Image (cartoon, grey):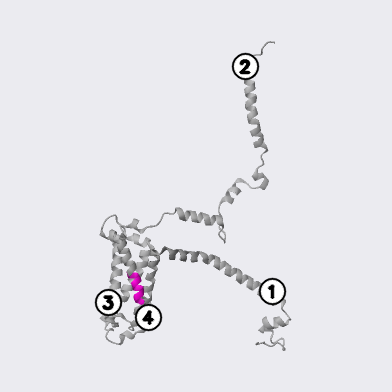
Amino acid sequence: MPLETPSENGLLGGVGRAASGLQVPSLARMSFRPSLSGLFGSSQDEMQDSRVPRKTLLIDAASMKERLRLNMIRPVYNVVKFYHTDGIFQWLAQHRYFEAATLCVIAFNALWISIDTDHNSSEMLIGAQPVFQIAEHSFCAYFSFEWFVRFCAFKKKRNGLRDGWFVFDSLLVLMMVLETWVMNVFLLASGAGSGGGLGNASILRLARLLRLSRMARMARLLRAMPELMILIKGMVSAMRSVFFTMMLLAMLTYIFGIMFTQMMVDTSVGQTFFFDRAHCNAHTSCRWDSA
């Protein structure tokens, strides 16, 4: 029996059939694969719109995770990037001992306010005992010096407005200078320090307001205690949930109040607990049960 030799047409035909055999199943699967847009009737534009996050009244889990992820990758803010790269003021403003001394003075000032409230009976500083005057002038001088150091540390002075703590301290220092130095100089210049001018009600109210503003300086202690900031941020975040819980309770109370009022008409319980003053004139037998 003679051996058959593969011809060129046979080889090419076999390769073509093999290639076509490999491609046919994939094409078949692609041709018979059901389309999601055809099943659900949504176009590609609608699917793209569905992937866009929509703002809702309540925050879903995906939005919370995305917000946490953005907060984690957000660069940490540091006011030092606005400072000079060299100089005595930027070195002093960044020094840890200077920051620790400032926090100690703030804590001692908060303690001194209680001592001043209990033992200083004078409404104005110029009429107080020398120990209280020395303490107030010392606090005002230190906080003014601390503000001046931080202000000179900024490379561009307008960047101080971009730092919240510096703006906050600037307002407190301004009020303290007005209370301790400007107001006393005004009283001495007007001659009210030795006469009855200290009894002016408007001046006394302004002095009390400026004195109470010193308690706001204790907020700087929160920056040195991250745990307190975490608690405060947690309370602020929980206010949203607490608000909606109160709304839910108010709605339930309102609905059940109307329901019980309608169901207890012409009953002894309704006359006792759901009394209506508007129908007292129509029903002569209606009496208010004080018990």
The amino acid type, in three-letter code, at marker 4 is: Arg
Dot 2, crowdedness within 10 Å: few (<14), some or many (≥20)? few
Q: Which of marks 4 and 2 is nearer the N terminus?
A: 2
The N terminus is located in which quarter?
A: top right
Q: In this view, does 263 lie to the left or right of 44?
A: right
Residue at horizontal 50 percent and vertical 64 percent from the top = 237
How far apart are labels 4 and 2 at the CA level?
112 Å
How far apart are labels 4 and 1 at the CA level?
53 Å
Residue 109 in magenta stretch: yes
Front disc: 2 or 3: 3
Does residue 229 sit above or below 63 in this rendering? Answer: below
Dot 4, crowdedness within 10 Å: few (<14), some or many (≥20)? few
Q: Mark 4 points at which residue?
A: 205
Q: In the picture, residue 7 is in which quadrant? A: top right
Q: Which of marks 1 and 2 is nearer the N terminus?
A: 2
Does residue 263 sit above or below 35 in this rendering? Answer: below
Q: Name the residue under label 1.
A: 259
* Residue at disc 4, secondary structure: helix
Q: Which x, y percent locates residue 250?
A: 60, 71
How far apart are labels 2 and 3 at the CA level?
113 Å
| Callouts 1 and 2 close, C-beta under 8 Å | no
The C terminus is located in which quarter?
A: bottom right
The circle on residue 122 is: none
How far apart are labels 3 and 1 at the CA level?
69 Å
Q: Mark 2 points at which residue?
A: 8
Residue 176 seen in the current view: yes
| Callouts 3 and 1 close, C-beta under 8 Å | no
Q: Name the residue under label 3.
A: 134
Q: Earlier in the sequence, mark 2 or mark 3?
A: 2
Point out the stretch of residues depicted in magenta.
Answer: 105-113
